[in-house]
Image (cartoon, grey):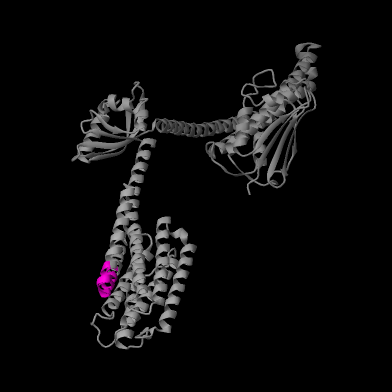
Amino acid sequence: MMSYNKAMTVLIFVSVTVGLYLTNLYHYLLFHSIAEIFSIVIACAVFMLSWNSKEHTDNPYLVYLGIAYLFIGVLDLFHTLGYKGMKIFMDYDYYANQLWIGARGMESLTLLAFFIFAGSKKKLSYHTVIVIYTVITGIIIASVFYWKIFPICFVEGQGQTLFKKISEYIICLILLCSGFALYKNREEFDDYIRKLMAWTIILTIFGELAFAFYIDNYGFSNLFGHYMKIASFYLVYKAIIVTGIKNPFDLMFRKLRDSEERYRNLFNTALVGIFRTTRDGTKILAANPAAAEIFGYDSLEAYLSEFVPRNCYADPAQRSEIGQRLRNEGKVDNFELLTTDRSGNQKWVALSAAVYREENYIEGAVIDISEQVENRRKIQEAAQREAEQRGKIEMAGSVLHDIGNAVTGLGTTATRLLGDKDWHECKELAKLERMTEQKRDAFAAALGTGKEDALITFVRELRKSMEARCEQLHLDYQSMTKIISHINEILHLQRRYTRDGQAGQRAMIHLTDIIEDALAINFGGFEKRRISVRRGFQPGKLPGISGDRTRLIQVFLNLFKNAAEAFDASEKKEDRTLEISAELLNSDKIRVSIADNAVGFEPEQAAHLFQADSSTKNRDSGIGLKQCRSVIEAHGGTVRIESPGKEKGASVIIELPVTK
């Protein structure tokens, strides 16, 4: 097919060339008129094609070129009408030579500007370009016909003037510059267009050289020059056809094909299930592989042939609701639907669909949201647990308040019962003892000799026993008062941590305050075990950290409890010491060390102590260390346990970042 088209093109070109030459044999004016009219028609066609394709071209300079060739055609029309022998302009025979120079100068400069600015982002409005070429064309025509100031280009009997020849050479030079500009900006044109425009420049140069040498307006050089002009105009026409019409339509159809291909790929590879069903939901008309996968089908073919949309609803009420919405509103958006897949498993999907009543089908999309629904359920359960925990905290606060009131009442009662160390019974017994001593003789006479000593001894011992019991009760009162005070302190701390809220709330805190509170709560246990606490820090001297007060107090309470229980398992009964230090490291970390001289452990055990069921003690008190590490790491810190060996004590080292 391509060979046939090329053959026809060659045949037409040869026929036109021979036909024009035959007209020259008959009369040169006939040849000249046909050749120029052909060029003028091509110039007008170039304008119309470029102008009407301006909406489809990405390069406005192509339209500028078409506008320029319209005005070049106007000058060529005047050139044809003013040619010697046409007998239209009777006052001078050589207007055509002047108009030729004007038209070719405009053409060469236009081509130069076109190739220089073809890739430029600078743009003029099309009407501005039309005005510019109208003014230039008007000036050339007026300078030739009206003002008659255009230089003479041909003298009868002498031939072309020096101005005419120099002008032709200048035009050729401009065309060479156009060729250089075309080469420099070759990336702006495809190969075919670049070749057409290069040949346009070459043929125009040959034509201008031919017109530079002729001495007769009817001579061979003139004939050859017109052939070159016709060929160059035709190549410009071809370039406009390809760039302005053929390429845009090819591009448009290629874009359509690409869009179709992209849509097909998107449809087939989308993770969202896309479908089209009959309005009664009895058949799937079209779907993508994702829809088949959501409903448990291995292949799209099986899904299309077997799946019945109306049967996939796990809850008939949802099917009724969707049907009602489609009838009333024509669509549903993100409807959460419980469905049953091919294997009978239930899963949640989000359905969006719309009814196309004229086409009598439903189109839509489904997304598997089973995981999201499950996560949402877990979040709701977590929120419920959180609410329950908050309720427990509030209840604990209330209970602690009641316990505090009861303990306060207990302290008041103890003070009333035991607070007075000067019991009147003891005083009365002392008076009775003194009286029996003073009345010894009277008691001897009344009771018998010797029995008065027994009475006096009895009263004395009774007094001493009563005083001893009074002293012991007073000591017990002091101990009870101390215990009640400690209980009140613990209750105060517990109420404060309960009032601060549940775990998870962060605030600016001081670690030393947390340590002091934990020590206060464990004070009774340390005192009972005769554990001496040594502090290696000053409260309030270290920078604060952003932390969860409740979680951190739980960590230190657990660590102090573990330390106390470590002493229970130790053989050491005296000199029990717990050393606690806190220091700032490199201005960005706080290190807390809790060191005891209790049971200790073998160094290789350290890596396993943070496991849930690991412990260095005989009883199961080691659990909690794993949770401690989780809390510390959640605060961006680290925790480790060290020991030099059995019965050599252990150290817990915690490092937490300082809040800038």
Q: What stretch is highlighted in magenta?
A: 22-38
Q: Quadrant of residue 228?
A: bottom left
Q: Quadrant of residue 473?
A: top right
Most extreme residue toward the front is: 25
Q: Is residue 131 above or below residue 510?
A: below
Q: Give the camera-side residue of 1 and 343.
A: 1
Residue 378: image location, x then y, percent: 44, 31
Q: In this view, does 610 lie above or below 263?
A: above
106 drawn magenta:
no
Q: In this view, does 184 lie above or below 404?
A: below
Residue 574: image location, x then y, percent: 80, 24
35 drawn magenta:
yes
Q: Can residue 266 be seen in this view?
A: yes
Most extreme residue toward the left is: 358
Residue located at (67% from left, 37% from top): 515
Q: How many marks?
A: 0
Q: Is residue 486 visible?
A: no
Q: In this view, does 242 lie above or below 226?
A: above
Q: Give the camera-side residue of 50 and 361.
A: 50
Q: Give the camera-side residue of 513 and 324.
A: 324
- Please indicate whether residue 488 sits to the left or right of residue 651 in the image: left
Residue located at (80% from left, 18% from top): 441
Of helix, strand and loop, which mostly describes the magenta segment?
helix
Q: Give the camera-side residue of 224 and 440.
A: 224
- Please indicate whether residue 193 sits to the left or right of residue 551 in the image: left
Residue 249: image location, x then y, percent: 31, 53
Residue located at (71% from left, 26% from top): 606
- Please indicate whether residue 273 sits to the left or right of residue 565 in the image: left
Residue 172: image location, x then y, percent: 44, 73
